[in-house]
Image (cartoon, rainbow, N blue to C red):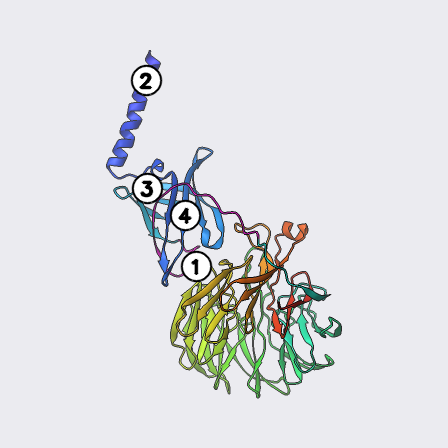
Amino acid sequence: MRRRYVARCASLLMTLVLTQGHATGTLQFSDLIGWWVADPSHGGESSRVVLHFEEVDGKPSAQLWLPAIGMYDINLGAVSLENDSVDTKPLSFPLKWDASKERLTGLLPKDAAPVYDIPVEFHRSEPLSKPRPPQWQINKPKVRWFVEIGGPAWAGLEHDAQSGLLFAANDPGTLHAIDDSGAVHWRFETGKAIRGRPSLIGAYVYVASDSGFLYKLDKRSGAEQWRARIDSGSPARIPTNEKDSRWDRYGSSTVSDGKHLYVASRDKNLYALDLETGKERWRVAAADMMTATPALYRDLVILASFDGKVQAVTAENGAPRWSYDAKLAVAGDVVVDHGRVYVGSRTYDLIALDAATGKELWKHYYWFSWIESPAVIRDNTVYTGSSDAVNVYALDASVGALKWKTAVPGWAWARPAVSDDLVVAGTVGVGAYPGSRSGSLVAIDRKSGTVRWLYLDAPTPETIAANKGWGFGASPLIVGDKIYAMDLNGRVMCLEKS
């Protein structure tokens, strides 16, 4: 009898505590248990965000869903409550509780929106289910040939219409000249990774290597003409599957105005070299390393660095002309077309600037995604890949408005190839990751955004276990009725375009 009395008193006391807590607006974890959805907006577009609160092993737990990038059950960590607020740790997501409206409000955490303060308001939802990963049952292209080049490839391809040679470089540091049948005509060893696309200028091909040199080679024989020092001691690249990586997957290619060669370096310098001799004429220092190929406009060289600065300097002597702050790293190549500069930033913005003045013309926000993929402009349309957004985008070049975006199997980091009718993008996959990512080569109808065909690159069990990437990290090329591509298994491939 006494035990029932004590139990009843305890129950009444707990009810009183809970009632008083609600009366004073104090948040209880029981108020949160269940599903919450929000649709924050930025840059004229919105994206769904989901929170799921539940008890796991008797402890409050919170998971975050970002359906736009296919990431689910992101564990935010321990849940803490204080008065009318909730937060999580170690992934902090502080929110205010409005008991009268049953709403949770705050700002998207910096891990999800690194620069902008984007308001978010959650309301209750019915339980949600994760969608099934895409199966990608799409037509496959015909492979004409492939050739092994002895190591993973990140540097884009270059093709010489006159000789028919394809120039392909790999991580072991070898540049290959390959003919249209897949036969290797010559090789040139640099000893260190080549991450920038070989540049064909006149009768010569120029290739920069992590050896610290830019090499000038005869395009037909591979004979070295000269080498020029373009790195005075940058730190070694940290692989992307290791802690503290800066995800500096690519390197600068070389551009020329017919007098000088210009190449950016991870040692924080832009180098201007004499076209004929390779002798340094001047250099300009940035505040951080550079992996973006510079671009030319009139008498200007436009460069970008990992501190987010986009700068224009005079081609004659490197004197500063204008500067723009993109806030976070610009890792992909600078592109100039019809007086506009296009750069992608890790703020999730594709940015268009006036090439003469550096004035911002427009931005387009890629939700939850870096933009490493250099832009390709054709018929007043900008085409890019993306990172975690796992999409290929087509935007109006004048105003940045979205024309279409098409889901692809993995990270589309590299520059897409664009022809009259197709956009061809390479994607990279990885093993352990919160969202599905697969390596592939995908062909998309340029006008409609419809996928025409897909070549899926299957990983080995060892690749998955090591959490290494697979697929196509190098930019593909379209030449007539053929598509050339390189994968992270060290193969150069020739595929039929349609």
Q: Is residue 213 visible?
A: no
**Residue 114 drawn in magenta:** yes
User: In the rendered image of this protein, does residue 112 appear above or below residue 60?
Assistant: below
- Name the front one of labels 1 and 3: 1
- Circle 1/circle 2 CB separation < 8 Å: no
Choose the circle earlier in sequence order: 2 or 4.
2
Specify the quadrant of the image occupied by residue 190: bottom right
- Name the front one of labels 4 and 3: 4
The amino acid type, in three-letter code, at marker 3 is Glu
From the viewer's perspective, tell me whether residue 168 is left or right of residue 419: right
Q: Which residue is denoted by mark 1 in the rendering? A: 367
- Circle 2/circle 3 CB separation < 8 Å: no
Q: Which residue is denoted by mark 2 in the rendering? A: 6
Q: Which residue is denoted by mark 4 in the rendering? A: 50
Separation of marks 1 and 3 at Cα, in angstroms:
31 Å
Q: Nearer the viewer, residue 247 or 34?
A: 34
Circle 1 crowding by C-alpha within 10 Å: few under 14, some 14–19, many from 20:
many
Q: Nearer the viewer, residue 471 or 62?
A: 471
Q: Is mark 2 on a helix, strand or loop?
A: helix
The amino acid type, in three-letter code, at marker 4 is Val
Residue 471 is situated, as x and y percent measured from the top left of the image, at 62, 60
Q: What element carries label 1?
A: loop
Residue 62 is situated, as x and y percent measured from the top left of the image, at 43, 42
Q: Which residue is denoted by mark 3 in the rendering? A: 82
**Residue 141 drawn in magenta:** no
